[in-house]
Image: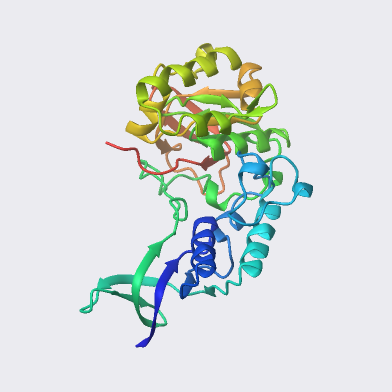
Amino acid sequence: MEAGVGTLVVGAGSAGLATAAALVKAGQPVSLLEKADQIGASWAGRYDSLHLHTVRWLSGLPGFRIPRSYGRWVARDDLIHYLREYAELSGLRPELGVTVERIERAEDSGWLVVTDRGVRAVRRVVLATGGSHTPRLPDWPGLETFPSEVVHSADYREPSAYAGRDVLVVGAGNSATEIALDLLSVGATVTLSVRTPPSILRREILGLPIQLLGLALIKAPPGVINPLVAATRRVSVPDLSAQGLPRIRNPYTQFKETGTVPIIDSGIVAAVRLGRVRVAAATVSFDGPAGSPKRWQHSRTRRSDRRDRLHDRSCAACGPPRRA
């Protein structure tokens, strides 16, 4: 068994790096493990056009601001560079490619962390593995025999392969809406399949990032948050009920009960309002004509509104399971 350290942090993303840096600053012994082969792997594995929805000057980690040269809304590659620089300046040396298999109580009231490279005995463990590292693809009926391409948003990188195609994007979170906009840039026909209509907020209002509203309301009760967020959407976002995205009466309560995150608008509102992105009901199954060969390009999805549509490609951006 390897010699123990005071604290072992699992995950070298933003939270893990910030936690480990704070411990180092406090003079505490710390080890940092990362399953992937690089720092900030969850960001590195996402689509090329990804940008932060939080403004640059409120997105940095403790002790080191994100450089002004990265712009107001930080791009994926710039964020990854920032995280690596933060680790170096903080004196962190994450052990990459190490998988934590289980964590057990030790007899001395500490912890035994079992990894694929041995067992670590530590006093404390901080789990900073995030909630978006493992893709989830619903078990739709007909998916295994679906003759056309279905990809998860975690595997989507850029839109060139979808040029001129009819694409169904399943989901109504920020990944889904940003990928929909990405697809429009190459002339794809895009349909957004929505199970639970989300709340929609502008990324900024009158030059002020919407993030400031969230910070101001962080300790407020639902009875205060719900009407304020609903009113913010009402005065800043046009009514999209006719297009399939109705306003939510209690957006904060919906988020807490179902996990449906708000859309931070980076162009999807205009695209839906102008009909460039169509909105459809939830996808409940996939099928194709009987005996259709695998090379057949047009396939069918059956939606909960009992309407069928043929699509060339489908991209699932479904997010985590819905809360009970």
Give the residue drawn at x 72%, y 40%: 72
Q: Where is residue 297 in the image (x, y as percent from the top left)?
A: 58, 41
Q: Is residue 108 left or right of residue 198?
A: left
- Against 102, residue 221 (above or below) is above
Query: Above or below — where is 284 with respect to 96?
Result: above
Q: Is residue 46 above or below residue 104?
A: above
Q: Indicate the position of residue 269 as horizontal and vertical percent values.
A: 61, 22
Q: Would you place residue 263 above or below residue 269 in this image?
A: below
Q: Which residue is drawn at 71% across and 45% down?
A: 160
Residue closer to the observer: 47 or 160: 47
Question: Percent position (x, y) of residue 193?
Answer: 48, 30
User: Quadrant location of the N terminus?
Assistant: bottom left
Q: Quadrant of residue 206?
A: top right
- Which residue is at the front of the view, 235 or 296? 235
Percent of width and height locating residue 94:
54, 72
Quick one: which residue is furthest to the left in this view? Answer: 107
Would residue 105 appear left or right of 123 to someone viewing this image? left
Q: Is residue 238 visible?
A: no
